[in-house]
Image (cartoon, grey):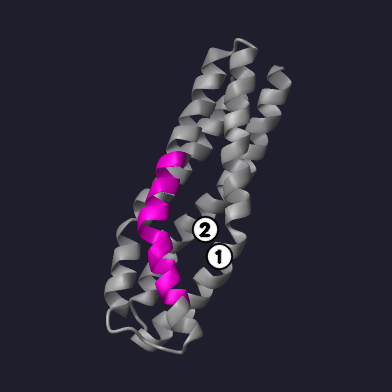
């Protein structure tokens, strides 16, 4: 049973790490790059990034979350409480990330995607991006901590 818990944790690391890398890239690189372009370019770039990202990124995110939950449950059944606690910690971190994404990022993503598809530049384009940027460090941190917790679960 513990081998299954570790296999699930490994799958969780892979799915979560993909989302972590994306959020970390946005926090470290994309945010600064976007600050140097005009509103029309910002909307075109980010609207299209979100158009594709919001279609493709849920799969690795869901895989990471489901695998982390499976790892926690399997480790608990096996009586490996430290491993279960680490995997459960990852689940909690990922659920907080998901809440931030759904409440803040996703609505902004939809607005920028719609504007890009309509070849429109909303008057509040910079404010939308600033609100998105406001939580990207928190999102990257939550994902990074979840990856760390899953790695600790692998070691338990």
N-term mark: 2 or 1: 2
Query: Can the viewer see residue 28?
Result: no
Which residue in the structure is indicated by mark 2?
22
**Residue located beneath label 1 in the image:** 53
The quarter of the displayed image where residue 73 is located:
top right
Which one is nearer the viewer's eye here, 73 or 147? Answer: 73
Residue pictured at 40% horizontal, 47% vertical: 99
Q: Secondary structure at mark 2?
A: helix
The magenta stretch spans residue 26:
no
* Between 22 and 126, the one nearer to me in the picture: 126
**Residue 120 position by quadrant:** bottom left
On the image, the x and y values in percent for residue 150 come to 55, 32
Q: Is residue 94 above or below residue 86?
A: below
Please state the horizontal and vertical placement of residue 24, each as a whole percent of the image: 46, 55
Is the residue marked by circle 1 packed among few (<14), some (14-19), or many (20+) residues within 10 Å? some
Disc number placed over residue 136 in the picture, else none: none
Residues shaded magenta:
95-113
């Amino acid at each position: 049973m513990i081998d299954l818990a570790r296999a699930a944790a490994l799958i969780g690391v892979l799915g979560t790490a993909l989302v972590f890398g994306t959020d970390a890239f946005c926090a470290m690189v994309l945010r600064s790059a976007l600050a140097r372009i005009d509103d029309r370019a910002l909307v075109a770039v980010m609207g299209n990034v979100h158009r594709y990202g919001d279609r493709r990124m849920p799969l690795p995110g869901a895989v990471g979350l489901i695998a982390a939950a499976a790892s926690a449950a399997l480790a608990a059944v096996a009586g490996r409480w430290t491993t279960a606690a680490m995997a459960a910690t990852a689940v909690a971190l990922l659920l907080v990330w998901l809440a931030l994404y759904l409440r803040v990022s996703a609505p902004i993503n939809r607005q920028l995607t719609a504007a890009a598809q309509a070849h429109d530049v909303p008057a509040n384009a910079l404010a939308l991006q600033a609100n998105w940027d406001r939580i990207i460090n928190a999102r990257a941190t939550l994902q990074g901590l979840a990856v760390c917790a899953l790695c600790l679960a692998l070691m338990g």
